[in-house]
Every structure is written in structure tokens, then in C-alpha cells.
Image (cartoon, rainbow, N blue to C red):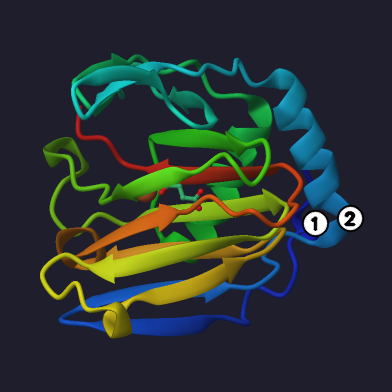
Amino acid sequence: MQQDIFADTSRSEIVDLGDNAWLDIFPQWIATAQTRVLFNLLLQECEWEQPAIRIAGRELPIPRLQCWYGDKGAVLRYSGKSFPPHPWLKALAELNLQLATVCKRRFNSVLVNCYRDGSDSVGWHADDEPELGAKPVIASISLGATRRFSLKHKFDQQQKSSRHIQLRDGDLLIMRGNTQANWVHAIQKTTSSVGPRINLTFRNIQC
Ligand SMILES: O=C(O)CCC(=O)C(=O)O
Ligand SMILES: [Fe+2]
């Protein structure tokens, strides 16, 4: 992948969530010409899974497809399940290198989610598993359809403190500081007609 596929990376916005929690957003961090190539490549090459997890006492398939990539030993754990990593796809390793220029770190793993349509979602959660460490930096890249990323405070659940951000094709969102400690986030189902979306969250698992 060439350097010039990345759009103007100096253009970023900060969303201050208070108490040392904040988001950095780089709209269209990946240029539109390349997002389609990347989207199609991931759709074809990812080894998509739809694992079942226990929700309210019942084993149910997650409402999206996912695949976990990373260094050997970077095991993803949530809802009592463990997912050993698939070895890095070349395209994901290259994206990780480019992220290093913005995030000043190399991530050791990435969760790839595919939301096939508006009925796919991810429920309210924080990426606050102990193996992600305190104040984890999590870099999220969106490809394909625009979906609404919602945040609500863990301890102040008033509607007015919620935030909503439209994540568009090529956008990079970085969650920083106390975002995982103080906030939960979700991509909620929508009844509007939306096409497929792929989201990549790059993380560092302590292993
Ligand atoms: O799809 C997104 O934008 C968010 C995904 C997410 O929160 C996660 O994978 O932990
Ligand atoms: Fe998350």
C-alpha cells in the first residue's frame, strides 16, 4: 500500500468527554479511492465468524461478523470466550504501520467487525478488559456505510450526556485516556436502509 492513499492526516478534531477522556477524529483518514479496495479485500479475505456468547442467560450468536488478527499470544477475551489471533493479513499490517505515524505506537492486534446491514450492531460496552491495560489507546477505522457511534457515561446515564458521532467511510477515530474507564459505546441497530460496514479496532493486548 502506498503512502499517498492516506488523505490529509493533519485534519483532526478532538471530542473532549471530560475527566481526561477524549476522542481524536481524523475524517476521511483513508482516501475514498482506497477504502473500496480495502473493504472488498477484507470482505473476501477475512475468516469471518459469528460466535455465540451468553447474553442474559442465553447463548446467542453475536449480531455481526468478526475476525481477530494479531501477534502470536494476543488472545482476545470477552463474555467468557477466548479468541486466539489469526496471523496478520498484509493489508492490516500495513494499516498498522500507517497508524503508528498518528498514534506513536504499534498495535499488536486488531478486531475486524462486519455489520452486514442496519440490523447488525454492537451493544453497549467498554473495551476495558484488564489485558488492555489502564487508559488504553484504541484506534478505530471505518469502511463502507456510515453508522452512528454512540457513547454514554457509565456513571451519569442521563440522555443529555450521551454523544453520537457519524462514522463515515475512511474515518479514523482514536479513543484515549479515560474513555474506556468512564464511558460505554455502541453501534445501535437502525431501521434505515444501510449497506455493509467494516470496522477495525486496533488494540494492544498485554501478553
Ligand atoms: O464498529 C465500531 O465502530 C465499534 C466497534 C467496537 O466498539 C469494538 O469492536 O469494540
Ligand atoms: Fe468497542
Total numbered circles? 2
Q: Quadrant of the N terminus?
A: top right
Is residue 178 positioned above or below 14 on the image? above
The single residue placed furthest to the right in the displayed view is: 33
Is residue 121 positioned above or below 80 on the image? below
Does mark 2 have its CB less than 8 Å from ligand 1? no
- What amino acid type is highlighted by mark number 1? Ile
Is residue 47 positioned above or below 118 on the image? above
Q: Is residue 36 visible?
A: yes
Q: Nearer the viewer, residue 104 or 196?
A: 196
| Residue annotated with mark 1 | 5
Q: Residue at 60% of width from left, 35% of height from top? A: 92
Find numbered disc 1 in the image and state the secondary structure of the residue it sits on: helix
Q: Which numbered tag is attached to residue 19?
A: none
| Residue annotated with mark 2 | 33
Does mark 1 have its CB less than 8 Å from ligand 1? no
Find numbered disc 2 in the image and state the secondary structure of the residue it sits on: helix
Task: Residue 66: give x, y in percent of width and height.
Answer: 51, 27
Instruction: Mark 2 vs mark 1: give the one in front.
Output: 2
Q: Quadrant of the C terminus?
A: top left
- The reply to whether callout 2 and callout 1 are in contact (CB within 8 Å) is yes
Q: Residue at 57% of width from left, 45% of height from top? A: 199
